[in-house]
Image: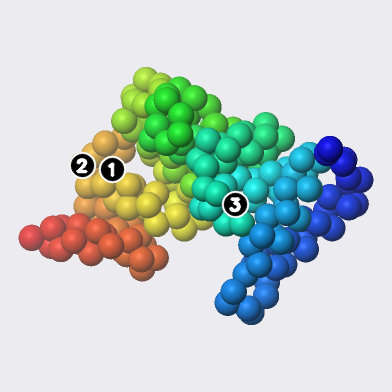
Amino acid sequence: MITFLSKKEQQRRFLLGYHLAYETTSRKKDWNNIFCLWQSAATSGHKRAQFYLGTCYDHGLGCKRSLATAIEWYLKAARQGHTAAQFNIGFCYRNGDGVEQNYRKALKWFAQAASHGDIPSQREVGYSYFYGQGIQRDWQKAVYWYKKAACKNDPLALYNLGLCYKEGEGVRKSLRWARYYFQRAGALGHKKAAGQLKKLKV
């Protein structure tokens, strides 16, 4: 029998689970307890608990790993506007993880999260436009979305912009700007950026 919790109790259980999972110094986490706390809040409609319950099923934390069940919980949170859940659903559809690959559905979820400022989703909308996945290819729109994510120091978006400027795809070709974006991506840990910088010096 499912007991529906008050909003206050949902939040209390979610926050307690979050504290036990991420805010304690203990190396050994009590994932069974964390899972139960998030499950009780999630089944009552708490969207952040729904997302984190999805991550439990995604990684087998406190439960048997089940990507299908993870996606069910991600969808519940995504439909309530949880941007990280929307990104995860988009990622699953783009790669065919646990669902049939569908670029249009992937872009739909990426775009929803991107419109609310989710940085990885902004980059992925750019990626979708660049490769024509789920939408007509448009390099200028790809650059627009890459720049939105790059403004917030997303290393992959910075690297992709470097490639666009290097090849003149969606922008006027500029090795100076390519170098600028590769340098920024490299400073943030993008491993391929250094290789691109070496090629520009040849």
The kind of residue on which mark 1 rests is Cys
Mark found first going from the N terminus, 3 or 2: 3
Label 3 and label 2: CA atoms lie apart by 47 Å
Local SS, label 1:
helix
Q: Which residue is mark 1?
A: 164
**Screen quadrant of the N terminus:** top right
Q: Residue at x 71, y 35 (%)?
A: 80
Q: Residue at x 36, y 62 (%)?
A: 184
The kind of residue on which mark 2 rests is Glu
Left or right of residue 135: residue 5? right
User: Closest to the observer: 173 or 99?
Assistant: 99
Q: Nearer the viewer, mark 3 or mark 1?
A: 3
Asked if the residues shown at circle 2 and circle 1 are in contact, with their CB atoms under 8 angstroms apart, the answer is yes
Q: Which residue is mark 3?
A: 63
* Vertical relation: 120 (above or below) 23: above
Left or right of residue 123: residue 131? left
Q: In the rendered image, is residue 114 in sight? A: no
* Vertical relation: 151 (above or below) 4: below
Q: Which residue is mark 2?
A: 167
- The spot of residue 20 in percent (x, y) is 70, 68
Label 2 and label 1: CA atoms lie apart by 5 Å
Q: Residue at x 63, y 39 (%)?
A: 73
Q: Quadrant of residue 135?
A: top left
Q: Residue at x 62, y 70 (%)?
A: 29
Local SS, label 2:
helix
Q: Nearer the viewer, mark 3 or mark 2?
A: 3
